[in-house]
Every structure is written in C-alpha cells, then in structure tokens.
Amino acid sequence: MRIAFFDSGIGGLSVLHQAQNHAPHHDYIYFADSEHAPYGAKPAAEVRDLVFAACDFLADLQPDALVIACNTATAVCIEDLRGRYEFPVIGMEPAVKPALAKVARDRVLVLATSLTLQEVKLEALLEKLDPRGRCDKLAMDKLVNFAEQNCFSGAEVEAYIRSQLSHYDLNSYGAVVLGCTHFSYFKPALSKVFGSDVALIDGNQGTVRHVFDCLSSLHGADALSEVQHPPQTTFYRSGKVAAAGMYESYLDRLAGCF
Ligand code: DGL
C-alpha cells in the first residue's frame, strides 16, 4: 500500500510516525506545505485553495489513501476533499472523546489553531460529546511558528504557553487535547507547565487505526500485510521533492515525545 499524508508543515509527521510504527512495511508519502505554513491564522478560503492544490498533487501520485494529518485543513474542507477523489480521505479532529472519557470530573482544555476553533466542525463535535460543558478552548497558533522554526523548548516557548494560559485555572484541568498535529512536539514543554498529572491527548493513534481499518475493509486484510521491498517514504515540501534527512530528524524527535 502507498499512503499519503498531508499537513501545512511538519506537524503531520506525528501521525506518520504512528503509522510507520504500526505498519513499517508500507510505502508512505509525506507532503509538508511549509512554504505556506502556518494555516491556522489564515482565512478559511485561502487555506482551502492551498489544501486543494497540495492534495491534487498527491492525487497524481495515486495513493491508496490520503490522510489529512492537519486538524485545521480537516475543519475547513474534509467533506469537499472526500468528494474530489476516488481513494479514501481520512481527516483528523481534536481528540475530545478520549479526553472526556479519561477524566471523570475535571475539565478538559482543547488547544488548537484559531481557524480550527472558529470552524463549525469543532462546535458540532463539542455539542455532541460535551453536553455538560466540561471543555474549554484555547488557540495556540504561535506553537506552529515555533515548530516550523525548529524551536520546541526553551524560555520563549514556555513564556508563550504561560501567557496564553494566564486567564485559565490550570488546576481545574485533568486533560489537555492537542488539537493541532504540530503540538505533539511540545508535549515536554506543555507537561512542564501543566504538571505530569495532566494527560496530554492527541488523536494520532485513533486516526492511524482508522486509516488501516478503512484500507482493510476496502482491499482485505491480506493486501495490508503485503510487504513492499524495501518500503519507501518520500517527502515533499510544497510540491518539490525534499531530502529525507531533516524530516527523519523530526521523526526521531517525535519518538522522544510519546
Ligand atoms: N498542523 C496543523 C493542524 O493540525 C496546522 C497548523 C497550522 O498550519 O497552523 O491544525
């Protein structure tokens, strides 16, 4: 199988990382639209055009499935993408359900980009899953800029996280949802601020499980166990083939964040 992953930048590598762990024998394609990142503070129409251009590029490579490893792109246009291509398109949404299940009484803080927080998709999800209103929402757009600048810790990152949280009572939260794939890189920094008792929950594993369930029901379990010799991962940066080294070092970094 050949599975394509799309994100505005290096965030979706946190989902690719899970997929490679789960099924190392497949071919993967990763597209980082880093020339246009971050998406989260752009108007929805602009993000939609960028996502369509990138996904049309990936569609020409004929993947068996496309993973929109970006909560923002999913919030803006996942239904349109599903109607546009023949292969399955799997999106991501903030992992509100596992977070609410994990903490019985405490509150849950959903971190995401401004655009994800603005879109109706998250509102609908919260209306369905959180009738008691246990979730609060907070934008952390600048973490995406930090990640794209290869800065994942240190005084500046910590000061930004603390300033965003200054109006929130940190003791009231039992779980924090990482509703942007870039935020996985900041698990150590977030843990330092929230304390190690607060669960940091992303939707990566659930998404990967869903991708392989989808492929298995479409092609059969045997097709999924077929081994590509040797399996390959190809990286693209905004439509141009990119050297693997830098992306592999991000994947290594992520391995230390889980
Ligand atoms: N990684 C993305 C997400 O999951 C997009 C971040 C951005 O480009 O602002 O939302």
Image: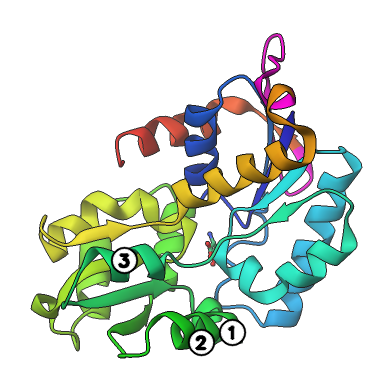
Q: Is-magenta flag for residue 238?
A: yes
How far across and how far down the image is residue 217, in percent? 72, 41
Q: Answer yes or no: disc 2 within 8 Å of ligand 1.
A: no
Picture residue at 21% right of the left edge, 63% below the top: 158
In the image, the segment drawn in magenta is 223-240
Amino acid type indicated by mark 2: Glu
Q: Which mark is residue 99?
A: 3
Q: CA distance from mark 2 to mark 3?
A: 16 Å
Picture residue at 18% right of the left edge, 56% below the top: 191
Return the residue at label 2. Answer: 123
Amino acid type indicated by mark 3: Ala
Density class for disc 1 (Cα within 10 Å; few <14, some 14-19, many ≥20) is some
Q: Is residue 32 above or below residue 27?
A: below
Q: Which mark is residue 169?
A: none
How far across and how far down the image is residue 91, in percent? 63, 60
Q: CA distance from mark 3 to mark 1?
A: 20 Å
Q: CA distance from mark 2 to mark 1?
A: 7 Å
Choose mark 3 or mark 1, whichever is in front: 3
Q: Earlier in the sequence, mark 3 or mark 1?
A: 3
Asked if labels 3 and 2 touch by Cβ distance under 8 angstroms, the answer is no
Q: Secondary structure at mark 2?
A: helix
Q: Is-magenta flag for residue 75?
A: no
Q: Is residue 174 visible?
A: yes
Asked if labels 1 and 2 touch by Cβ distance under 8 angstroms, the answer is yes
Amino acid type indicated by mark 1: Glu
Picture residue at 46% right of the left edge, 67% below the top: 94
Choose mark 2 or mark 1, whichever is in front: 2
Q: Earlier in the sequence, mark 2 or mark 3?
A: 3
Q: Quadrant of the N terminus?
A: top right
Picture residue at 87% right of the left edge, 38% below the top: 62
Q: Quadrant of residue 37?
A: bottom right
Q: Which mark is residue 119?
A: 1
